[in-house]
Amino acid sequence: MAPLDDEGDAEPQEPAAPEQEDDEGDRGPDADGWLDLMDGKIRKRILKEGTGAQPDVKQDVRCTVEVRLADSSGKGAEPKVLQRYPNWRYRIGDSEAVPALELGLRQMREGEEAEIFGAANMAWGPRGLR
């Protein structure tokens, strides 16, 4: 609410400066290359740029999925692959995958290779894969 002047009228205020965004309204990647897709709960890091279009809802895509646990030791160890699905077919928008993978795939371009990080509640939950 704007402050009132002596006569009870609101004083004009300058609008707040918008946060820096790119042409699509998204923030760019952080210093480590991670792009925040959902308040830190889902992030994507591009390993190889794609040149094709992003998939549409109900479009089938094929990809290779590797499920890993993030390194929590702080030692930077390469996480072990828990599951691998080569040449996996997935239909965008059918909720066949965990939310992190669904959103990550929707943000990828044909030919792109990326890492997708999902917090436990956006992946397989705190109990993980069992």
Image (cartoon, grey):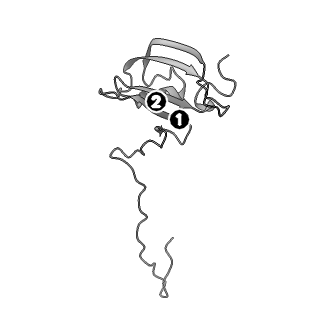
User: Whole-percent x and y of residue 104?
Assistant: 46, 29
What whole-number distance in Å separates the C-alpha atoms at marks 2 and 1?
8 Å
Residue 61 figure quarter: top left
Residue extending furthest right?
A: 127
| Above/below status of 49 relative to 5 | above
Front residue of 32 and 19: 32
Indicate which disc residue 23 carries: none
Q: Residue at x 51, y 70 (%)?
A: 1
Residue extending furthest bottom?
A: 6
The residue pinned by badge 1 equals 42
Front residue of 60 and 35: 35
User: Whole-percent x and y of residue 79?
Assistant: 60, 23
Q: Residue at x 41, y 44 (%)?
A: 28
Label 2: how many Cα within 10 Å (few below 14, some 14–19, many 20+): some
User: Whole-percent x and y of residue 20?
Assistant: 40, 53
Q: How many marks?
A: 2
Front residue of 27 and 80: 80
Residue 53 figure quarter: top left
The residue pinned by badge 2 equals 104
Of the 4 image quadrants, the one containing the C terminus is top right
User: Whole-percent x and y of residue 75?
Assistant: 64, 32
Q: Amino acid at mark 1?
A: Ile
- Is there a contact, CB below 8 Å, between mark 2 and mark 1? yes
First in sequence: mark 2 vs mark 1: 1
Label 1: how many Cα within 10 Å (few below 14, some 14–19, many 20+): many
91 on left or right of 77: left
| Above/below status of 36 relative to 59 | below
Q: Residue at x 65, y 27 (%)?
A: 125
Q: Amino acid at mark 2?
A: Gly
